[in-house]
Amino acid sequence: MTAHHHPSDDILLSYAAGSLDEPTSILIATHLALCPACREQVSKAESVGGELLNDVKPVAIQDGALDVVLARLDEGERGQINVPAPAAVPHDNDLNLPRPLTDYIDGSTKSLPWRWLGPSVHYAPIASHTKGPKVGLLRIAPGTRVPMHGHSGNELTMVLAGGYTDGTGNYTRGDVEAADDGLVHQPIADAGEECVCLVVTEGVLQPTGLIARLVQPFLRI
């Protein structure tokens, strides 16, 4: 199946440069495992970056520069990572997730801390230790209408199984939808198969319905 909705060029270039935060890197690596077109684009960007480095003229370095570099590497180990994106290889797991994601969550999703978000909707954080954007898995039963909501920040949603439709289009396995604080929508899971999504959020959901607003303080997403 070919993805029809892709991350922006800016995000792909940032991934190639290794400048994305960890949650977004997880989503992009997972998308690349399913999207040959974006894999090729990232590969080309990495090649261009390598050529530019080869053209840089060497300069003399100051005393103590090695200590500074090593200190920065230590900081990098505690912060941002750039998740590698191998080709889409089947992985033995309960939801048939792409390998970059299953490697990150150590295989099965059954042990994740799933919590109720509403009728037939469940969410599990997968990198709650990171600062900044949150990343987690969303499971929606077939045909379920997610409550109408907006966003207080940017959100990336990638479909891993099944699909959903909102006012911007239909999204199926491999597709990525980008939302910002100007989008208010109501995703509806496609019939016939559970919809499973990988979601990266910078802010919080902002429900527009009365009942959804009442339970929002307990959702923490």
Image: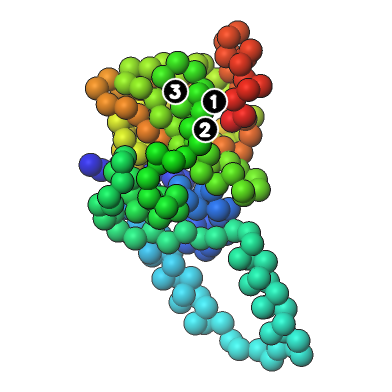
State the separation of the CA atoms marked 3 and 1.
21 Å
Q: Are marks 1 and 2 in contact (CB under 8 Å)?
A: yes
Query: Furthest-front residue in view?
Result: 111
Quadrant holding the C terminus: top right
User: Mark on residue 121?
Assistant: 3
| Camera-side residue of 199 and 7 | 199
State the separation of the CA atoms marked 1 and 2.
6 Å
| Total numbered labels | 3
| Residue type, numbered disc 3 | Val
User: Mark on residue 183?
Assistant: 1
| Residue type, numbered disc 2 | Ala
For numbered disc 3, what is the local secondary structure?
strand
State the separation of the CA atoms marked 3 and 2.
19 Å
Residue 178 visible in the picture: no
Q: Tell me if 58 is positioned left or right of 117 in this view.
A: right
| Residue type, numbered disc 1 | Leu
- Give the percent coordinates (x, y) of residue 153: 62, 34
- Give the percent coordinates (x, y) of residue 143: 33, 17
| Camera-side residue of 156 and 147 | 147
